[in-house]
Amino acid sequence: MCISKLCKIYEIAETKVEVLKQVDLKVASGEFVAICGASGSGKTTLLNLISGIDKPTSGEIAIFAEDLVGKDEDFLADLRCQKIGYVFQSYNLVSTLTVAENVAFPMEWIKKPVEEIEVRVAKLLQTLGVEHRRNHFPVQLSGGEQQRVAFARALANDPPLLLADEPTGNLDADNTQRITDVLLELKAEGKTIIVTTHERQLLNFADQRLCMEDGRLANYNE
Amino acid sequence: MSETFFPVSDLLRRKSQTSLTVISLTCSVASTLFLLSFSYRMGLGFASGAEETLTIGLSAVFSQLILFVGVLIFVVGAVLTSFIVFLTMKQRTRDFGLIKAVGCPNNLVFGYFMTELLILALVGGMVGLLLGFGADFTVSHLTALPVYQKPFNMWLALLVFVVFFLFALVFGTKPILDAARLTPMEALSSVQYYSLATESRFKPFSASWMMGKIAVRSLSRRSTATLRIILLLSVVFMLLTVSISGSLIAKDTTLSWVERTAGRNVVAIGTNEMVNQYGRLQEEFVGIAGNNGTFDYFSEKYIVSDETIRQLRALQNVVKVDARLILKGHVYEISNFTIDPETLATIPVGDKREADSILIGVESSNLTSSWFLQGRFLENDGSLEAVVGDSVARKIFSKPLVQSLRIDNQSFAVVGVCVDPVNNGNVIYVPMKKLQQITAISGPNIVFIEINSTSDRAAVLDQIRGQIEGVKQDLTLIEADLILENSYAFLNSAWSIITFLPLFTLASASICLIGYVMLNVDEQRQEFMILRAVGAKPKTIVTIVGIQNSLVMASSLAFGLSFGIIATLLILVSKPVVSGFTILQIALWLTLAASVMFVLSLAPAMKFARTSLLKIMA
């Protein structure tokens, strides 16, 4: 993945807010990147641009040898569904679907066989410790459980790139460890991972440790 | 912060929701006011136009249909208004809890939301009134539509505004009161908001099945709102069905009345002068011409001889020869008494009214016409019985079937009231022999001949012409179908105006549905955003909304169609004529209307699908 001279400017009323300023980032396949930074520094915006949810004001984003700039919504939707797993900071679970259905639907989307979906859902829910909640709706779960279901959904289609926005932000120590273990396992499997976090443990495991400051990416210095 | 300032600034802050609610309320009030005003003008147009040109039975069908449609329009608007405010205020439950949670007293929060409701209802109602007035002005003054020109009915506008405003207050206050009863925790709880606490077994299916699940669960999660829109659309579809099937069935039925009265494949024979005089009489009683002066009906020269009638009856392919004695006469009402079945007291019926009318003596066994009747037709040529046209019946009788009438010095018991579009209901049928006795006219003056429909019409007409040329009299043959066609032309033009109602109803129905879908999509915004963020294509959102709309429309269509057809057949049109072609026409129009509504209802979802993901997330 290669990002060069990425800029994002939001216009709020008549004020222009430059959230990302000439950001350059290269991530090799299988690399684990951790980005930290203060709230509002532009971390989520960067992940939104990488996933194609948002469009840059200028600059280039190349993922899997595809330049995302100028691609239509259908292409970006396919990309998010099959190649990018995104764990949102606010979980973003579909409230009308149960936990199992929330994890299953990205697979149903790409018409995976029913048996395969069942096995995969069971495995992911077990790995993340929410198997007992499989038939509950999101509103019946705690914040930490919703976070783990969101993680399971992001991994449903076994994407080569995982984006996680503060994946352990709402978790206790046990669950933080569980997520960290999963991320390490994914890293071992050769997945590319970009995580925004304040978690020191995650930063320690990262191949690239970066810090977002005032819209610019810099190397993380303790 | 003042109690008034906060709700105003809050409404301004929530621009899209506020404008959505105001637009929906405005459309509801405007479309109701416009449709009511349009029906009112059209009804007035018929009342004034029909007074002289339409028989009472026919104009009753028109006014009943317009009145019924008007009532339904009002109901639709009122239900839509209640639905919009209910949904809007229900969406504020979380905000209610939030404001309470930060320490605002309950009565103050209640005051905030009531002020918001009042502002929304007032603005929506006022703008709706202006738009409705504008649409009415445009249609009545700037288009060529044949509606009755009359000043805008301010009382109607006031009625619509007051009723809708009250509806908005009552139905909008309900969710605010419900929210006020909740603790901040309950109001903020997602479970309260989504009202979803059931479990379901997981079983993966296809993507389309999953879309169906989301669509259905979203509808059931908002069951109150869903039931309300189904109720609303049911009334809308009932209105549409009544407008479409009512006008088509009523058109066919009234045309059949004309056809039955005039007869099919019928020609008339009489002397030139008598035939022309009959035409003038019809024009006089239809209101096209004034009193056509004196005419000597007693002259022997107008009588068609028995010999001629016998010869005509002997012709091949002549089915019936209906000889009639037609003249203009003066009739008097004879009052009567009835007995109250409970008190056994005698009740006087009728008065001593009188009127001019077309008098027709007929032989009941040889009639070429049949009538839409209350009571019965003449059965015995020797009896002193009469059948009166509905216009005469209304003019000079109170309860015609228990009354009698007098022609010269002879009284006749009224045994039937008929709808007679050919003579505009201004007619009295009596046995010919009796009319001959009263008037001392020796025979019939016009003869109607029914020709075998399968025969070569031109050849039969030549045969008849040959026959009448052989007699000494100056007899002429006219195609009675001309009378039929004139009546047809009038009725067709009248019904073509009525057809505008379904068109406007369809517009109103579409506004209802689009308003609902806009609110529906807005409520599912978060859900759709998530789906798109995790890889759903924009068309998926349209599909989910499409499934929801189909379910809502199918349920509403089933109710609306059933009740609409029942209302049309049982209430609006007596003894309806429903042919296979009419059913096909109704089915086609309703399918077209439902399809148009369905396609239009997808517009908000398509607009939403085109919106950038980030904009939705924001």
Image (cartoon, coloured by chain):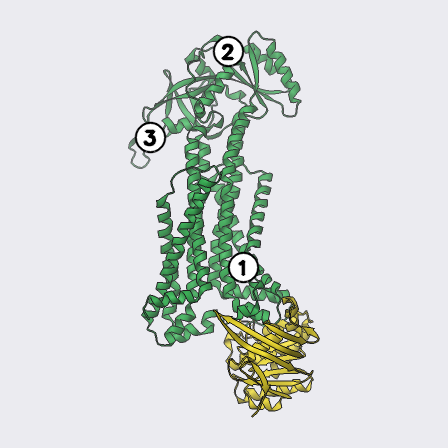
- The numbered mark, 3 or 2, whose residue comes first in the sequence reads 2
Kind of residue indicated by mark 2: Ile
In the image, A86 versus A106, the foreground residue is: A86
The residue depicted at 50 percent of the width and 64 percent of the height is: B522
The residue depicted at 41 percent of the width and 52 percent of the height is: B128
- Where B278 sits versus B17, above or below? above
Query: Residue B185: image x %, image y %?
Result: 41, 76
The residue depicted at 54 percent of the width and 17 percent of the height is: B447
In the image, the chain rendered in green is B
Kind of residue indicated by mark 3: Thr
Name the residue that disc number 3 marks: B338
Residue A122 sits in quarter: bottom right
One can see residue B563 in this view:
no
Label drawn at residue B604: 1
Establish whether labels 3 and 1 are both on one chain.
yes
Name the residue that disc number 2 marks: B303
Which mark is in front, 2 or 1? Answer: 1
Q: Is residue B147 left or right of residue A215?
A: left
Query: Residue B221: image x %, image y %?
Result: 50, 66
| Chain hosting mark 2 | B
Badge 2, how many Cα within 10 Å: few under 14, some, many 20+? Answer: many
| Chain hosting mark 3 | B
- The numbered mark, 2 or 1, whose residue comes first in the sequence reads 2
Q: CA distance from mark 3 to mark 1?
A: 64 Å
In the image, B30 versus B212, the foreground residue is: B30
